[in-house]
Amino acid sequence: MLAYWQGLILLRTNLLQPLIDVLPNSLANIPISKRLVTPNANNSNFIQFITPNNKAMLGYLIGEKILVLINNDNKMNSFDLSALKLSGKWKQIGNNNEINILGTKENSSFNTPLLPISLGIWIKE
């Protein structure tokens, strides 16, 4: 549990904060919690929500560099990510068992179905 939360903190401070720092001042001054909850015209492209018809699934893309997919269903599910700009090389840095900004032990593609009650986090390299 300690390693998981340390990895989550490293993700927040080393990967997400630099993305926030380059935003226009008007957006950078808004706390991230408010940006996530109330996207507006100034930041609608910074955080892109992925909302499948299955209400047990949710995803989001942050700054076109961090992808988070959550499957809260009791069966495996896949996300349709064809509308997103996900070109390039991506590395999995988080799953149910670990968050490691250097990469998880089991690196899977975001195109692979997610296991029941699971999450995946990828960064663009």
Image: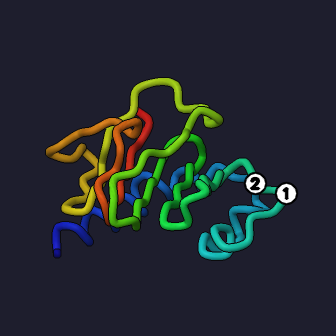
Q: Which residue shows up at 55% across the image and 66% down it?
A: 55
Label 1 crowding class (10 Å Cα cut-off): few <14, some 14-19, many 20+?
few
Residue 112 versus residue 116 in the image, above or below? above
Return the mark for residue 44. Answer: 2
Q: Residue furthest top?
A: 88
Q: Nearer the viewer, residue 90 or 70?
A: 70
Q: Amino acid at mark 2?
A: Ser
Tell me the residue at 39%/40% (across/down): 110
- Residue under pointer 1: 41
Q: Closer to the camera, 64 or 106?
A: 106
Residues at marks 2 and 1 touching, judged by CB atoms closer than 8 Å: yes
Q: Quick check: 15 above or below 31? A: above
Q: Position of residue 113 (x, y in %)?
A: 35, 44
Residue lying at the far right of the rendered structure: 41
Query: Where is residue 4 shown, x and y percent of the image?
Result: 22, 67
Query: Hey, which quadrant is residue 47 in on the image?
Result: bottom right
Q: Is residue 77 above or below residue 90?
A: below
C-alpha distance separating marks 2 and 1: 5 Å
